[in-house]
Each structure stands twice: as C-alpha cells, then as structure tokens.
Amino acid sequence: MLKGKSLVSINDLSKEEIVHLLDIAEEFSENPRQPVLAGNVVATLFFEPSTRTRLSFESAVNQLGGRVLGFAEASTSSVSKGESLNDTILTVANYVDLIVMRHPIEGAARFASEVSPVPIINAGDGANQHPTQTMLDLFSIRKTQGTLDDLTICMVGDLKYGRTVHSLLMAMSNFRTRFVFIAPPELQLPMEYKLYLQGKGLPYEEFTSLPDHIAGADILYMTRVQRERFSDPLEYEKVKNVYVLHESMLRAAKPTMRVLHPLPRVNEIATDVDASPMAYYFQQARNGVYARMAIMASILGKRG
Amino acid sequence: MLKGKSLVSINDLSKEEIVHLLDIAEEFSENPRQPVLAGNVVATLFFEPSTRTRLSFESAVNQLGGRVLGFAEASTSSVSKGESLNDTILTVANYVDLIVMRHPIEGAARFASEVSPVPIINAGDGANQHPTQTMLDLFSIRKTQGTLDDLTICMVGDLKYGRTVHSLLMAMSNFRTRFVFIAPPELQLPMEYKLYLQGKGLPYEEFTSLPDHIAGADILYMTRVQRERFSDPLEYEKVKNVYVLHESMLRAAKPTMRVLHPLPRVNEIATDVDASPMAYYFQQARNGVYARMAIMASILGKRG
Amino acid sequence: MLKGKSLVSINDLSKEEIVHLLDIAEEFSENPRQPVLAGNVVATLFFEPSTRTRLSFESAVNQLGGRVLGFAEASTSSVSKGESLNDTILTVANYVDLIVMRHPIEGAARFASEVSPVPIINAGDGANQHPTQTMLDLFSIRKTQGTLDDLTICMVGDLKYGRTVHSLLMAMSNFRTRFVFIAPPELQLPMEYKLYLQGKGLPYEEFTSLPDHIAGADILYMTRVQRERFSDPLEYEKVKNVYVLHESMLRAAKPTMRVLHPLPRVNEIATDVDASPMAYYFQQARNGVYARMAIMASILGKRG
C-alpha cells in the first residue's frame, strides 16, 4: 500500500501500515536473500555521511538483488558546483527507481518528495525525522517482546535533541505505551512531546537518575549524550558519567527486558553490557536491514 | 562497429557511426532494462568529481546488468601516492572490461587510450572533450525535432570555454545546421570554431543580446556563465543577469523549440521555465543514460 | 578448508593450504567469470585508502557474481563519530557475509577477527601484514617459474619496512628458497627475519649494490624506497637513484627471470623496463584478482 509513495516521516504511516510493514520485515528476516528487487536501481544520496545507515540500505538492496549507486558525502556531489537540491533530485530521478537521501537540513526530504518523480525515502534530515530507524526500533521491540501493545519503555539520555527518541515516541503512542523519561535537566523531553502524550491520554514519568527506574521497563532505550549539546561544558562533565549503563545495573531488570540503542554508542553503554542476554543493540542493527527491505519492496510494488 | 575501440573525442565518430549509435540509444530508451552487460565489469575512474556524469554511467551499466567499481575523486586513489596515469590505467585494466574516466587534464583520456589494453571512454578531460555529453545532446535534438538535419541552433552563454558547445558544434556540422551564437564579448566563440564552420560552408550569426534571437531557433542551448571565467569581476556582474532565460522570453519561440542545458545550471535558466513544455533539460539528462548504454554496449560488442 | 575462517596473516596458512589456494586461483585465472559468489555480499572497509587493493577485491567479488558495499576512507565512516572498531565490525557484520578491511594500525585486523561473527580478510594493517598480496606474489612466482621450490629470489629496496617483503620471505621459506637481499644500509632486512631464515637453515646473502646480483636470480622483487623512511634527507638523495632498475641491467639476467613489484611504483623501475618480456608487475596485479577470488570463494565455502 506504500507503492509509489515516499516515506519522509514516521507520521506518514498509519498504525495499520506500520504493522503491515513489520510483518513484511518479519518475512524478510526469515528469508533475506530473495531477488525481489532484481532489475531495480536505487540511489543512496548522502549529503552528510552516515556509514551505518548507508551500508544498511545498500545491504538491503543488494541482498534483494537490486543495484545501488550514489554518493557518501556532499563534497563529491554536484552540490559543490552550486546546484540546487531541486535540480539534483530531478536529475538523479532519471537514473533510478527510488532515492534514499540523508541531508543535514530539516525538511530537505519533504521538499525532495514534493519535486521528485520517483519515491523518496528519508534516511535522516537534520534533527527532524529518520523513519526507517523508527521502523527498525519498532521491529526490534515487537521481536523481543512478542507485541507492541501495553509496554513500558524507558528512554535515557538526550531526550531534547534525540531525533530517534521523538519519532519512536510518536510511533509507539499508537500502542498504549507507558513512557519513562530519564535525562539530565538540560536535555529533557521538549514540552510539545509531553503535550502530545497528554493529548493521547498516555502516561509518562520523568526522572534525572538512571539506576532506580530500570526494574519496571520492558525496553531500555539508550541514546548518546553529546558534549556539543551543552552550553556549559561543566554541565556535560557532570552528567556524562551518570547516564552510563553498566552490567550490574541490569540485575534488577525483568528477564525479558532488552537494551536498545540507535548506535553509534560512544560510552553510554559500558562494554560489559555487551555479553548480557539483555543487550540487543547489534541485533537491532541487523533488524534495520529487514525493515529497509520491507519499506523498499513495498514502495517499489514488490510487496502488498 | 565500435567494438573494442575507445571513445575519446566526438570527432572519432563518423556521421554514420553517430547516427547508428543514436539508433541504438533509441532502442534502449524504449527498453532500458536488458541484461546485455551481464558478466561485464566497468570502472568509473573520476580523477575529479562529477556526480551527474558518474551516476549516469553507473545507472546505464547497472540497468544493463553489468557491474561497476571505481572512485569518485582522486584523493582516494593511488594518484596521491605518486603513481603515474600510465600505471593506474595498466593496473585497473586488469580488473575490468572497460574504463570510463574523467580527468582534469586535457589529453589525459587520449593518453590513457594509447596505453590501455581495454577500451577507454572519455567522460571529460579538462576543457577538451566530453563525447558522451555530445551524444546525449544529439539524441535529445533528434528526439525533440524528429531529425538532425537543417536545424537552427541557438547557443547561449559561455561559448569561449564551454566544452559541450564546441563538441556539439562540430558534431552538428555534419547536418547542415544554422548556428546563432549569443555570448558576452569576453566569452565569444573562439576563432578556430568560426573558421571551422566557414570551411564547412555553414552559416552562423553572432549576437550579444539574448531575447531577440529566440524566435528563429529550433534548439536553444543554454550554458553556465561562470564567475571564474572573467578576468574582471565587474564584467561578470554586468553580464550575469543578462544571459538568464525567463519563461516570458519563450513566448516568441516556435512551439516545437526546446531548451537544452548540459547541467548543472546555477541561475542561467529561471525556475519558471521548468514548467514550460519547452523545458527539456531534465529529460535530456535521462537521455544521457540511453546514450551511454548505446556506447558501452557497442564498445563491449553487445550491439553491432 | 578455509571455510568460515578469517585470513589475517600469511602465517595463518600452512604450506598445504597455500598450495591448495594457489590451485584454486589457477582455476579462476582460466575461468574468472563464474557466479560462485551469487547471493553473497562482501564489505570493503578501507579505514585508509588503497585504491589498487580495494578495486582488486571489488573486481574479484563482482566477476564472481557477488555484491560489494563499504567505504574507501575513514573520513566517511562512523569512526569520525567516535565509534570503536569493535562496534563498527559488530554492526557491519550484520550487513554482509565477509569483511575485507584495511586499517592503519597494526593488529587491527587480528582484533577484528576476534570479535567478528563473520570472517575477516586483512587487506593490510599498518606495517604488519597483507596476506592477499603475498598470495598473489606466490601465484605470480609459481606461474612464471612453474614451481615454488628451489628458487633464488632477489629482493631489492626497502627491506626494513617493506611489509610485502617480510610476508613473502616467510611464505617462501616453506619452499627451500635462496634469498639475496639488496638494500641501502639504512633499510636492510631486520635481524629477526635473518634469524628466522637461519633457524630454518635457509641461505641468504646481503648486498648494497643492485646491478651485480641480478644474474643469479629467478625472481627480482623490487620495492619502493620512500623518502619518509629516512631520518636524514641527504641519505635518501644518495640512494634514491641507486636502487632503480633499468632495462640495460636485465641483459645479464636468466631469460626466465621475472621482475615483480607490489605497486604502485614511483621511479624504482624505469619505464624502459615495461616493454621487456621480463616485466611482470602488471600481470602480477591481474593475478591479485585470481588470488582474491580463491581466498574469498574458499572462506565463503564455495571452494573446498
């Protein structure tokens, strides 16, 4: 039902569309080497670098038998000759069936989807949206918990600027989620998202301390706390070691709890967590391939 | 008939070869997804970046089932280790069936074609030649006008340094073309090309003002006027807004006239032209894929 | 027998494994376009650029029908976001069946092989190892001499830092080789390798002058003498033109002698050598494709 459509924001998808895409991703996770994109050519236009996301898309296309072309950073693109985004998109649309784009400016993907004759998948536009990340988060949550309904999700770290947190929150609001937000005072969830949850009648709690609130969580969603987000460097020094997950902190957790992280991590998850059965972030990265397979196959009309 | 040969300059092709290649391109435009290059590997060696040209070639190879490898800029190539072009070409020729190369130095492609055991396609060597661009221009002219014979082509902008203008002029001189050249005094067509046309007995006119001369044209070929071409910045400021095409200027044109541009444009075609049925420059970019398919399939012996 | 294993060092391979891989490479050299890697995806992660090696691997994968993704330099990778090598490898391992990596730090490939769930091929880690280079050297020696046994190999140039020299020396020590080392005093073979040969009971001689010692050689293995290896620039100026091979110097050589060079060369082989039937370095580069085909096909279980 996504056939021929662009995917710019997770909010473009209804609850039913999300669930349907997750079912397709589930199918691909069981049988990822199907030539359903044979004969298709996909562009990956990365106006800013994001190796992880780019390689994940390229793996998905290649495993499904499609072909990829594109660029990994803007310096090697026509942008450096002063070309407008409009012209770049209208030109590349002549070469491919689908454009995956990453751009540093918010709204760039929406603009591209409005001028492009071929579908656009937003692979991140500034601090705004990254819907395929959200789809792989949802896939990982459903896969590990057996359901998306009635879960308690504890989100930790930079809740102010964290694009993945905001999109996941909005997508999960379809599924009666209970939210627990844990962030330093400077990086708390913006008011607009709290109002959004209130409008939906969904419960949430806010804390500034990590260890005490893991026990009730089904999902612990960790994010990076980046130095450059702090106006006062001393403030960063104060919190940087507070929002670090250690293996010992998982003892109070439900056995079925899983730790997610959009990656790359820097130090917010200690490496001693990696060996825990609760660590799921590398498997989560693998799920990104399946989620992207589902989205591309749907948009290109190869899956209902 | 190009089988195993290099394509360095449009002048390497006879009129008959040009027409034959255009016929093959026409065939591919009707059916672009044929696995005629299955089993072939093509290198795209871009010693200077040109995203548009590189992606066009890579789309052509991929749509025809071939494989691509290469580099998008010299900084990631062995050139930075002091290797000679001779050695780079002789090495890469071991890896592929065909080398597509872009190089900042005039004559680089000719040199490469003389040392390489595999065919070379010149994708631009400095200000010199870019024959696949000329082929797509010819394809676009024939496609929109139904013929290459007896047309009036109005060339606008930088006629002094414009590589595409010079190559197109020489190729069209096979087809009884009438030329109208419109350029600022500093950027007029070099004398050698005027003498060339005189030698062929072909008529041309020269003007410095754009609007008055559109009415008689079958093709309006716009080019970029680049600041760095002017010795005097004030001279650039004086002309930069004079050689800009606006939609209103098309009212006097023949209904069958089409606007071409090698792209990227900066501001020499106002965006209000884009919606006009006379705007053909993005379709022209698409034609580049078909022209390159024809050239590569011919060189690799997959088309007579 | 390499199925599922990593290849980090040439010393990981027994004499029997080396010979078996060379036999597989021989098969691929006779029939290089076999779709034995169809359905496989290989990552080429080049944390430092090496166009030649990267394109050789990518040609091998593509000729065998597999797919490639990756990056050509670290600046476009997640490394610039502070990600650890551990996390990069664990993430990319989700996308592919095999990782080919080049890294500036010695030991990086060994570390990667210890954490990765998919096999790693070391495509060079600092001054340490580059086993696929050694395999293509061995292939070239056997191909040109008909055997690996009882040969005299004359190694010339930078024998102190030359990674390829050290690996080739250790691999050839399985085959009763006689070694002749020719290097300036500052760049002589390190004592550890001499002790290694003594321990194996293998004869070697050391000289500082090139011309006199070519006559007895079956293989003349030339290497680059790099300015940056010298503490004293005057020392470099003194030797840089001494270790240059000219065509005239080949007159005393055995007719079956062949000149090898890992490439890129700068000026240590004069171009007048290129036309000699003894020049084998470009064919040697081609052999790299076959050697890498053999290694990848074996690791991916497509060849016994």
Image (tube, coloured by chain):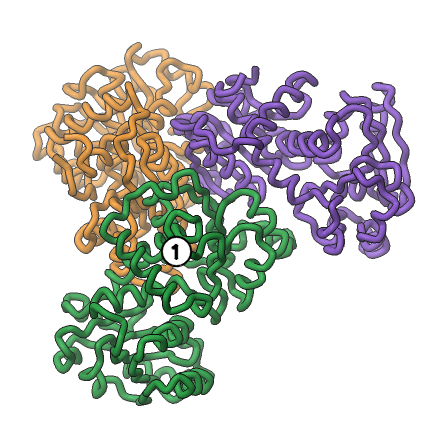
Chain colours: A orange, B green, C purple
Q: Secondary structure at mark 1?
A: helix
If the image is split into quadrants, where does the N terminus of chain C sit? top right
Which residue type carries mark 1? Ile
Query: Image quadrant of residue A146?
Result: top left
- Residue C140 versus residue A248 in the image, above or below: below
- Left or right: where does residue B175 sit relative to residue A76? left
Depth check, front residue: B225 or C235: B225
- Residue C80 versus residue C175 in the image, above or below: below
The answer to whether residue A167 is seen in the rendering is yes
Measuring from the top left, give residue C44's x and y in whole percent. 49, 36
Query: Image quadrant of residue A235?
Result: top left
Measuring from the top left, give residue C3's x and y in whole percent. 52, 17
Label 1 environment density (alpha carbons within 10 Å; few <14, some 14–19, many ≥20): many
Which residue is found at the position 38% from the left and 50% from the top?
B297
The residue sitting at the top extreme is A255
Query: Image quadrant of residue C194?
Result: top right
| Residue hosting label 1 | B295
Which residue is found at the position 12% from the left and 28% from the top?
A174
Which residue is found at the position 28% from the left and 12% from the top?
A256
